Image (tube, rainbow, N blue to C red):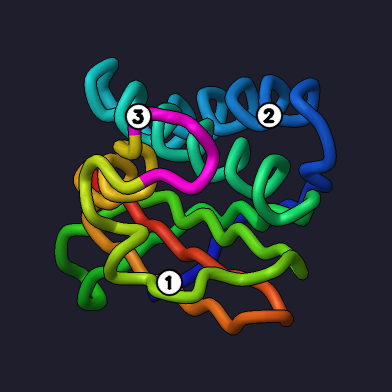
């Protein structure tokens, strides 16, 4: 797998969430995603950025444009987003991924919904240290 482009942005406020949505949309277009796939990765990014602000006290997102494939063969392109915060962490990750569970008064669909919108989803969280969520969507 080759990383062809990277960027990192702070996610500290709702304005940053809006900016992240715009940047992800632009990158998704550049990767060649259709409208449905653009919407899926943008929706996941929006939810995860909002979680970083509301539950993590702010953080960063790293964007990576990816390519993979055997030499001379077809190339598959994708977009990987890594959200990191140094907030309180998630005590029970499996519970947090369960639809309907909420710690902030929402509908409890955000984290699990984000997982369903991408091809690859990885979460690491340590209480008192923070959370890292890596999502990848392939074309």
Q: Disc number at residue 123?
A: 1
Which is closer to the viewer, label 1 or label 3?
A: 3
What residue is rendered at 79% in x and 51% in y? 57
Mark 1 and mark 3 in contact? Answer it, CB < 8 Å.
no
- Give above or below for 44 relative to 95: above
Q: Quadrant of the N terminus?
A: bottom left
Q: Secondary structure at mark 2?
A: helix
For label 3, the SS is loop
CA gap, disc 3 to disc 2? 19 Å
Residues marked 3 and 2 touching at CB (< 8 Å): no
The residue that appears at 72% across and 63% down in the rendered structure is 85
Q: Which residues are magenta?
A: 102-107
CB atoms of marks 1 and 2 within 8 Å: no
Tell me: residue 36, above or below residue 103.
above
Give the crowd class for mark 2: few <14, some 14-19, many >=20 residues within 10 Å. Answer: many
Q: Which residue is mark 3?
A: 107
Residue at image coords 28%, 70%: 94
**Structural distance between the alpha carbons of marks 1 and 2:** 19 Å
Q: Residue tagged by mark 2? A: 17
Q: Residue at x 27, y 62 (%)?
A: 120
Q: Earlier in the sequence, mark 3 or mark 2?
A: 2
Residue closest to the eye, 80 or 126: 126
Dot 1 or dot 3: first in sequence order is: 3
Towards the viewer: 74 or 106: 106
Q: Position of residue 89 (x, y in %)?
A: 61, 71
From the viewer's perspective, is the residue at label 3 or at label 2 nearer?
Answer: 3
Q: How far from the left and from the top, in percent, is residue 82?
A: 57, 61
Overall secondary structure of the magenta section: loop
x and y, in percent, of residue 99 in the image: 21, 45
Look at the picture and state if 6 lies above or below 17: below
**Mark 1, secondary structure of its residue:** strand
Q: Quadrant of residue 104?
A: top right
């Amino acid at each position: 797998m080759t990383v062809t482009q990277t960027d990192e942005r702070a996610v500290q406020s709702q304005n940053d969430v809006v900016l992240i949505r715009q940047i992800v949309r632009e990158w998704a277009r550049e990767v060649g995603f259709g409208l449905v796939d653009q919407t899926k990765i943008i929706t996941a990014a929006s939810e995860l950025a909002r979680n970083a602000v509301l539950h993590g006290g702010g953080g960063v997102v790293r964007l990576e444009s990816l390519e993979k494939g055997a030499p001379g063969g077809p190339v598959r392109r994708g977009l990987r987003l890594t959200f990191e915060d140094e907030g309180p962490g998630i005590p029970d990750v499996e519970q947090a991924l369960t639809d309907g569970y909420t710690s902030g008064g929402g509908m409890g669909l955000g984290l699990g919904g984000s997982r369903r919108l991408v091809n690859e989803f990885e979460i690491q969280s340590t209480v008192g240290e923070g959370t890292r969520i890596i999502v990848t969507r392939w074309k």
